[in-house]
Amino acid sequence: MPKNRWPPLLLGLWTFALSACAPAEVTVPPGPALEESMAFEFALFYTGPPREDPRPALDGLLAHDFPGFTRVKEIGQEKIGGRRELAAVWVTDARQSYAAPGLEGLQSAGRGLDGAQAEALQQSDQVLRLLFRHGGEHRWSGMREALRLTSAFARQTGGLIWDEVTREMFTPEAWEQRRIAPWPEAGLPDLKRHFTVHIDPKENGYRRAVSLGLEKFGLPDLVVEDLSGSSKTDVGNLINLLAQALGEGKAVGSRGEFDLDLRSLGPSETRDDNLESLAANATAKARLRLAQGTWKEGDPENRLFEILFDRYEGPDLQARQDRLLSELFGSEDSFAKVEHDAKVLAASRQAQEKLAAALKPAFQAGLPPGEILLVKAPFPSPEGREWMWVEVIEWQGDRISGTLQNDPVEATHLKSGQKVEVSEADVFDYLHRFPDGTEEGNETAKYLYPEG
């Protein structure tokens, strides 16, 4: 089987750059990555007449329940000092100037919405935008109060809550459940509840992971280039952990070095869940390098730090990524010598037929987001051949290129995560993984491992 290093999904909600070697001039400034001023925007969408006029309702909340905010006409750029500022902008033509996501977008970006609410949002023209700004001394308290104010305002006036930076739409109940209720009375919040990670395909067959929403805390957003589909969960967890560490004020080194240690983090759901899911051989540590990321369309308007993997050895970027993730989270792999009897070979032929007739054209046409195709193929070793799994990245004619998904035992000239190429004619089996965690294929396993 392919390497099993997939703990439970711990990402901030999915709405599913540079070279690996970073020259000194692109590394990020040393020290803590926290900025001293931050601005962000929430908004209230109304799918019908508000329960009461939002503008005087907001004035009442500010006067009686949230007096710490200073109401301003617009958010400026001058030094904020110790103030917490709030500007409100009423929009009456939202479908033209500030439209809600479409129905397809709300399937991934809607939190707690039912079908009727999603439909009604398509006709919503009335929106009250809430623009917040505060300084570093209010980094945590200011955000908590902004969340509470937005929640109270939505409940009082009957609005749905939009987070402009993470691009998510919430019911007030979902907002409370995800953003407010888990925030501890003392200490930092679990940051993964306040940002998202988008993982999108690239033209080269790999994927790109980028966070959205960390600017709300004065933090850079984080990006990983050219990851394989099989590593997306681990990469997402790495982003969560690094964000939490940066939020705690842990400093970047003089050349962008950042040593991540799970056990040195303060209490949080992110830390605890990852510690509980570590494999037995995990170190719970990772040696990162951070560099200035390359902005792409759709990225947040924020500083962008790319996570580099050049402090690990490997023949290519994907092998170095795999080495870091394997050391940080641990890995479990199995190796056994088995005979290919008549039943096994018949199952393999069936797998090859389905692969050629259905899965090859489906892959070449483009699998849906989140689906992954792996093939099992032989690799030469001193003992003859070692059969291992490869995640398919490119398929041209008879040649299949991808990343190796096993830790080689006999074919020690190869490394897990390394880019390899195999012949379609040599493929022995396939495995088709779906976003919900289900799988199809591995037709030969029931004969190779009848007790497994």
Image (cartoon, rainbow, N blue to C red):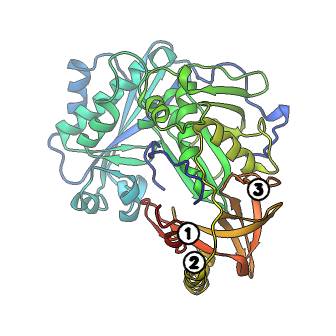
Answer with left or right where residue 21 lies relative to residue 191.
right
Q: In the image, residue 291 lies at what x, y percent?
A: 73, 35
Report the residue marked by disc 2. Answer: 344
Answer with left or right where residue 359 lies relative to residue 184.
right
The residue that appears at 60% across and 84% down in the rendered structure is 349
Three-letter residue code for mark 3: Glu
How far apart marks 1 and 3 lie (CA) works out to: 19 Å
Answer with left or right where residue 272 lies relative to residue 315.
left
Three-letter residue code for mark 2: Val
> Are dots 1 and 2 in contact, CB under 8 Å?
yes
Report the residue marked by disc 1. Answer: 448
**Which one is earlier in the sequence, the residue at label 1 or at label 2?**
2
Label at residue 410: 3
Q: Residues within 10 Å of mark 2 (few under 14, many from 20)?
A: some
Choose between 268 and 65: the one closer to the eye. 268
Is residue 294 shown to the viewer in this render?
no
Compared with 163, 432 (above or below) is below
Query: In which image quadrant can residue 18 be found?
Result: top right
Q: Secondary structure at mark 3?
A: loop
Q: Residues within 10 Å of mark 1 (few under 14, many from 20)?
A: some
Q: Secondary structure at mark 2?
A: helix
